[in-house]
Image (cartoon, helix red, strand yellow):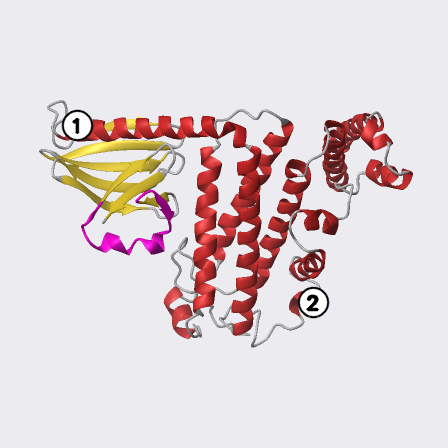
Amino acid sequence: MMHEKSRTISHEEIVNSSRLGSKPSDDYMQVVDMLDNIVRECIYVSRSYSGIESPSAKHYYSSVLFTALVNKGITLAQIMPLTPWVDKKIEHWDYASAAGIVRTMLELRIAFYYLCSEKCDEKEWECRWNIFNLHDCTSRIRMFTAMENNEEVDILSNIADQIRTRLIENSFFESLPDKKKKAALNGQSAYLFPLEDIAEKAGIEKSQFRWLYVFLSSHVHALPMSFYRIGEERGRSLPTPVEEGYTKLCLSLASTFLVNTRDDIHFLFQDFKERSDEIIETESRKAQELFETKTNLASSESIRVGDTKVLLSTEAMIIEATLIQDGILEVRYLDTKSGAVVLQSTESESGTYLDLYDLYYWTFMLNGERVTNDQMSFMDGDDFVFKADPYTRTLHFKHG
C-alpha cells in the first residue's frame, strides 16, 4: 500500500485559510484594555510592597496568594484575543481555557479573603491555617500513594498526625460541632465553611457564585457539558458572538478579583506604606544615579569607541553601555536569567533615543500616571522624554 508523504503546513497557509472574522466590539476591546491596566497595576503594587518582612503569617500568605492571583492574571492577559501582551499572527478564541484560569482566580480570591482579609481572633486563624495544612498534607499523601512512594507517604502521614494534634488542642476547634470537627480531621476539605458563604462575604453574591462556579468548572474537565455544543458558535477557535461574550465575561471577572484583592493588600499593608514609599524612593534615587552615570560616561575619556562597560549587574537585570561614536552611547538593558534585551537606547548630550523595549517586561508611567502600551501613541513623535528605572522595572515618560 502506498502512503502519501505528509507535509507540514506553514504559518502563512494557516493564516490564509483561517476565517479571521469581523472586528470585535468596542465593549470587548474596553474589557481587554481594563484587564491589561489592572494586571500591570497589580504587578506594580506587588513590587511596591516587596522587601518588607512579613510581620505575621497572615501577611506572608497574603503575599503568596496575591502573587499567585497576579500570575494567573498575566497568563490570562497573554492568551486573550487582541491582547497587547503577545504579538500573534492569528487571534485564537478559546473562552473555555480562559474559564479554567478564571475558576482558579475565583478560588484564589476566596482563599485570600478567608485566610488574609476576614477578621477573626488568633485561635480561629490558627485553626483555619492548620486545616489548610492538613488538606495540603492529605492531598500529597494521595499523590504519593498513587506513585507507590511509601517512604514519602510515611513521612507525610506522621506530619498529618501532628497537625491533627494541634487542631484538637486548639480552643476554637474544640468549640466546633462534632460533625464539622470530624470532617476537618479527615483532611478532605480545606475550609470550615461552604465556599459560597465565603464568596458572599468576599463580595460575590451567593446566587452569582453558584452559577459561575458551575459554568467555569464545566470547562476544567472534558465532560459532556464542555464539548456537547461545540460547533459554529463556539469551540472552534474562531471569533463569534458567543466566544466574544463568554471571553468578555471571563476577563471582567478576572479584573474584579484582581481589583478586590489589590484593595485588600493595600489595607493589610497600610501600616507599612511608609516603608514601601521609602523603598520606592531609594530605588528611584538609584535609578537617577544610574542615569547620571550614563550621561557622564558618554563624554568620559575612560572609554574608547567600541568599548563596553557594565553599569549595573543584579539578579534581575544587567545594564551595559557601548561607545559607538565619540559622545554617543548604545545602552542595553538585559534580563539576567534569559539574556534577552528588554530595552535599548542611544544616548548623547543632545538627548536620548528609545530604540526598542519589551512592552511585557516594563510598567509604564506617563506624567506620573500608570498607562498601557496602547495609550502611548505619543511615541510616534519626538515630543517626549523617558527614564528607565531598572529596580522597579518601570519606564517613566513625560509628554506634552
Tell whether position 156 is magenta. no
* Mark 2, residue position: 225
User: Label 2: how many residues lie within 10 Å, few (<14), some (14-19) or many (20+)?
Assistant: few
Q: Quadrant of the N terminus?
A: bottom right
Above or below, 58 relative to 235: above
Of the pair 331 and 61, the residue shown nearer to us = 61
Residue 253 shown left or right of residue 397 in the figure: right
Q: Residue 128 carries which label?
A: none
- Give the magenta-colored segment's residue range: 367-384
Q: Is mark 2 on a helix, strand or loop?
A: helix
Q: Report how many numbered discs are placed on residues in the image.
A: 2
* Residue 249 vertical placement versus 187 (above, below): below
Q: Is residue 173 visible?
A: yes
Left/right of residue 169 with respect to residue 197 in the rendered view: right
Q: Residue shown at 70%/61% (left/top)?
A: 211
Q: Nearer the viewer, residue 197 or 154?
A: 197
Amino acid type, mark 2: Met
User: Mark 1 is on which residue type?
Assistant: Leu
Q: Residue 48 appears at what percent x and percent y?
A: 45, 34
Question: What's the residue at 39%, 63% (across, down)?
Answer: 89
Q: Where is residue 168 in the image (x, y as percent from the top left)?
A: 85, 28
Question: What residue would you read off at disc 1?
Answer: 297
Residue 81 makes an appearance in the image:
no
Q: Is residue 373 magenta?
A: yes
Q: Distance between the residues labelled 1 and 2?
A: 64 Å
